[in-house]
Image (tube, rainbow, N blue to C red):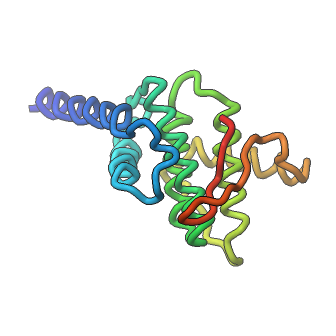
Amino acid sequence: MAIEIMSTEKSEIANAIKIIESVAPDGYGRMPILSETDSDLYEQIQFALQSECVSDFLLNQRGTDNLFKFIERMASNCLRESDFLYCEHAAQATEVVLSQPGYDENMVQVALALIYDAYERLQKPRPIFNFDQLSRFETAWTSFSARHAHEKTISTIKYRIGADHDGPRYICYW
């Protein structure tokens, strides 16, 4: 019976990986926010975070890129709606990215800068992140926040805020 459960779990993980890697169509980053693709990706991110070992979710480059686009879209939605929930979604996606071996540190810094900027624009008192399932994100967030407090700028991070037909949007130079 234990072998059957392990086999089922591995199959579910493989399916989640396949969805993360393939669900986003070309042009996903510029699609209207929120979309069904966002919901599909978020569902798989939640599955990964609730799994026993998020590092079992080894993604190809397209999967990782889809998560970065998801982060950009969630930060943009937080900017539009001033809702912490979208910062939390972006943080959860970042946790999955940080579990990937050899992740691109520069891209993670851009993701953290987006989340940080959107978070800082929220009204005070701001909610805090639930770090229970986000240990990698917590470490990266703490380091990024400390560096930002010391340097007082994130100008080296390549993004801007642009206007879109449905509201402001972060535009990243990954």
Tell me where residue 92 appears, x and y as whole percent.
50, 50
Residue at 77% of width from left, 41% of height from top?
157
Residue at 47% of width from left, 37% of height from top?
66
Displayed quadrant of residue 12: top left
Residue at 58% of width from left, 27% of height from top?
103
Check the image and report above or below for 43 versus 129: above
Q: Quadrant of the C terminus?
A: top right
Q: Quadrant of the N terminus?
A: top left
Check the image and report above or below for 99 versus 45: above
Q: Is residue 43 left or right of residue 145?
A: left
Displayed quadrant of residue 110: top right
* Residue 125 appears in the rendering: yes
Tell me where residue 143 appears, x and y as whole percent.
75, 44
Q: Is residue 149 left or right of residue 56?
A: right
| Circle count | 0
Displayed quadrant of residue 139: top right
Check the image and report above or below for 131 versus 139: below
Tell me where residue 4 appears, x and y as whole percent.
11, 30
Seen as rendered, the residue at the extreme right is 151
